Image (cartoon, rainbow, N blue to C red):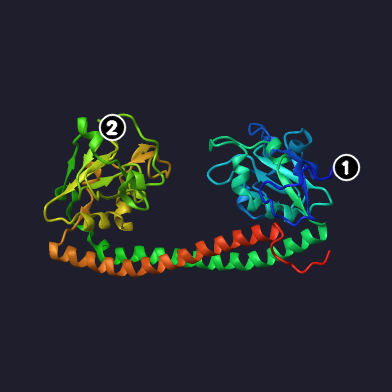
C-alpha cells in the first residue's frame, strides 16, 4: 500500500461524499508538526528580529499574511521553534475561547509557537481545500480533545483526521469557487458589522443626549440612595441568583451566559429587591450595573443601592451609564496603582466615592419624560439592530453551509475529471 492509499472506505464526518473520492488520514497526506516559543528571557532571540513568528491567536485571521512578532535567526538556528512554509494550514491546538480547533491558511513562511500545528500538504492535497474541510468540521475537531473545554488537541488528533480527496484539479476548483463565494459573503458581513457598531453608538448617544446633562450639576449622589446590605441567610434556597452583565444589566443567573458554576451555599450573599440598583464595583465603569428585575441574590462583593422615593431607578441607572458619569467613576477608582499612571490593577469604585459624584435629579415627571424619550429612540434603534444582527447570522449560516456542501461534493463547480 502506498502512503497515500485510502485507509477507509467511509468518511465518518461526511459519509455521503462522491464514491470516486478517496478517504485518507491526514497524517498520510501531510507533514504535521508544532512549533515552539523561544526563551523570552533571552533578549537576543527577541531583539532586532527578522524571522516571522506566530502565536495561537493568529488563526483568527482566515489567511495569515503578517507575523505576530519577529524573532532572531539565532532563535531559529538553536531549535527554539520550527518554520512552516507558505501554503501550509495551521490549526490551533489550544487557545482562549473559540481559538482551539480553528484553521488558517499560511500565506507567508513563518515560525510558530507550540500551540499551533503546522500541516504541510503533499502535492496531492490542495492547502485551501484542506482549510475549508477543516473549517467545516470545526466542532468535530474540537471534540477530538474530549468533552472538557480545557483539554487541548495534540498532533496525533490532527493526524487522525479523515480527509476526502477528490482529484487535485477538482480540489483547486472547489477552493477557488469557495474563495469567490465566501469573499462576497464576508464583505456583506463586514458592512453589516460596521452598521451594528454605528447603531450601537447611536443607541448610546440617544441616552446620553437625554440625561447626561444632569451629571456635574446639583448635589452629591449619596443623598439620592441608601446602600443595602441584607444577607440571605436561610432564605437563599428560595431566591433566584442574579448576575450583573456589562452588556445586559442585571439578569437572572440562568439567563446569563457568562455565569459561573453554581455554589453550594449562598447564605452569605446579598439580597437585592426589585427596583434596587446592583453595581459590580469592579466593572461598574465598564457598564456593570443595572436595576434588579426581581428580588434575588447577588454577589457579596456587589453594592446594592436603593434609590430615594422620588428617584426612578431606571432613570438613575441610565445616568450612571453615561460617558460623563463613567468618567467621574474612573477618577475615583481605587486599586493597585493610580489613575494618573493609567495602571490601576483590580480597580473598583467604593460606594462612598460613588456618592461624591454630583448629579442633579429633576422632578419625577421629568425623569419619566426623559425615560420615555430614551425608550422611544432606543427601541427604534434596537429594532434595526435586530434586523441587521439576523442578517449577519443568516449570512454566517449560509457561509458554513456553502463550505460544507462544496467540500463534500454537493456543488458542481464546473470541473470535468
The crowding category of the residue bearing disc 1, from other C-alpha atoms within 10 Å (few below 14, some 14 to 19, many at least 20), is few
Q: Earlier in the sequence, mark 1 or mark 2?
A: 1
Helix or strand or loop: what does disc 2 sit on? loop
Residue 99: percent from the left, percent from the top? 58, 46
Helix or strand or loop: what does disc 1 sit on? loop
Q: Residue at x 44, y 66 (%)?
A: 198
| 251 on left or right of 104 | left
> Is residue 59 shown to the viewer in this render?
yes
In this rendered view, identify the residue nearer to me: 144 or 73.
Answer: 144
Residue 404: percent from the left, percent from the top? 65, 57
Give the residue number, with chain letter if any, for mark 1.
Answer: 2
The crowding category of the residue bearing disc 2, from other C-alpha atoms within 10 Å (few below 14, some 14 to 19, many at least 20), is many
| 355 on left or right of 207 | left
Residue 246: percent from the left, percent from the top? 36, 50
In this rendered view, identify the residue nearer to me: 167 or 217.
Answer: 167
What number is the disc on residue 266?
2
> Is residue 51 shown to the viewer in this render?
no
Marks 1 and 2 sit apart, C-alpha to C-alpha, by 63 Å
Q: Residue at x 29, y 54 (%)?
A: 325
Q: Residue at x 16, y 58 (%)?
A: 361
Q: Hey, which quadrant is residue 111 in on the image?
A: top right
**Going by the picture, which residue comes out furthest to the right?**
1
Q: Nearer the viewer, mark 1 or mark 2?
A: 1
Q: In the picture shown, does residue 319 fall above or below 351?
A: below
Q: Hey, which quadrant is residue 345 in on the image?
A: top left
| 216 on left or right of 72 | left
Amino acid at each position: 500500500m502506498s502512503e497515500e492509499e485510502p485507509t477507509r472506505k467511509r468518511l465518518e464526518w461526511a459519509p455521503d461524499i462522491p464514491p470516486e473520492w478517496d478517504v485518507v488520514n491526514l497524517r498520510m497526506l501531510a507533514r504535521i508538526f508544532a512549533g515552539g516559543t523561544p526563551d523570552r528571557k533571552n533578549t537576543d532571540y527577541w531583539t532586532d528580529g527578522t524571522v516571522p513568528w506566530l502565536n495561537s491567536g493568529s488563526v483568527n485571521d482566515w489567511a495569515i499574511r503578517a507575523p505576530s512578532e519577529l524573532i532572531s535567526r539565532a532563535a531559529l538556528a538553536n531549535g527554539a521553534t520550527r518554520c512552516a512554509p507558505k501554503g501550509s494550514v495551521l490549526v490551533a491546538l489550544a487557545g482562549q475561547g473559540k481559538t482551539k480547533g480553528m484553521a488558517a491558511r499560511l500565506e507567508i513562511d513563518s515560525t510558530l509557537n507550540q500551540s499551533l500545528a503546522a500541516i504541510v500538504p503533499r502535492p496531492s492535497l490542495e492547502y485551501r481545500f484542506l482549510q475549508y474541510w477543516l473549517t467545516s468540521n470545526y466542532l468535530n475537531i474540537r471534540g477530538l480533545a474530549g468533552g472538557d473545554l480545557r483539554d487541548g488537541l495534540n498532533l496525533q488528533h490532527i493526524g487522525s483526521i479523515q480527509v476526502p480527496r477528490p482529484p487535485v484539479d477538482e480540489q483547486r476548483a472547489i477552493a477557488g469557487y469557495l474563495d469567490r463565494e465566501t469573499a462576497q459573503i464576508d464583505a456583506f458581513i463586514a458592512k453589516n458589522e460596521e452598521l451594528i457598531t454605528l447603531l450601537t453608538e447611536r443607541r448610546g448617544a440617544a441616552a446620553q443626549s437625554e440625561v447626561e446633562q444632569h451629571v456635574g450639576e446639583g448635589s452629591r449622589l449619596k443623598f439620592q440612595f441608601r446602600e443595602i446590605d441584607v444577607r440571605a441567610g436561610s432564605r437563599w434556597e428560595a431566591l433566584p441568583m442574579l448576575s450583573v452583565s456589562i452588556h445586559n444589566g442585571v439578569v437572572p443567573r440562568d439567563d446569563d451566559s457568562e455565569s459561573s458554576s453554581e455554589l453550594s451555599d449562598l447564605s452569605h450573599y446579598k439580597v437585592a429587591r426589585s427596583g434596587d440598583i446592583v453595581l459590580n464595583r469592579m466593572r461598574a465603569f465598564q457598564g456593570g450595573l443595572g436595576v434588579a428585575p426581581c428580588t434575588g441574590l447577588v454577589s457579596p462583593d456587589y453594592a446594592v443601592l436603593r434609590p430615594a422615593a422620588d428617584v426612578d431607578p431606571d432613570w438613575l441607572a441610565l445616568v450612571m451609564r453615561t460617558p460623563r458619569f463613567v468618567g467621574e467613576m474612573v477618577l475615583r477608582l481605587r486599586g493597585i496603582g493610580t489613575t494618573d499612571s493609567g495602571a490601576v490593577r483590580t480597580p473598583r469604585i467604593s460606594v462612598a466615592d460613588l456618592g461624591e459624584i454630583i448629579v442633579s435629579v429633576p422632578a419625577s415627571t421629568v425623569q419619566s419624560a426623559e425615560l420615555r424619550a430614551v425608550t422611544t429612540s432606543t427601541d427604534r434603534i434596537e429594532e434595526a439592530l435586530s434586523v441587521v444582527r439576523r442578517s449577519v447570522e443568516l449570512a454566517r449560516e449560509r457561509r458554513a453551509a456553502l463550505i460544507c456542501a462544496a467540500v463534500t461534493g454537493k456543488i458542481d463547480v464546473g470541473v470535468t475529471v
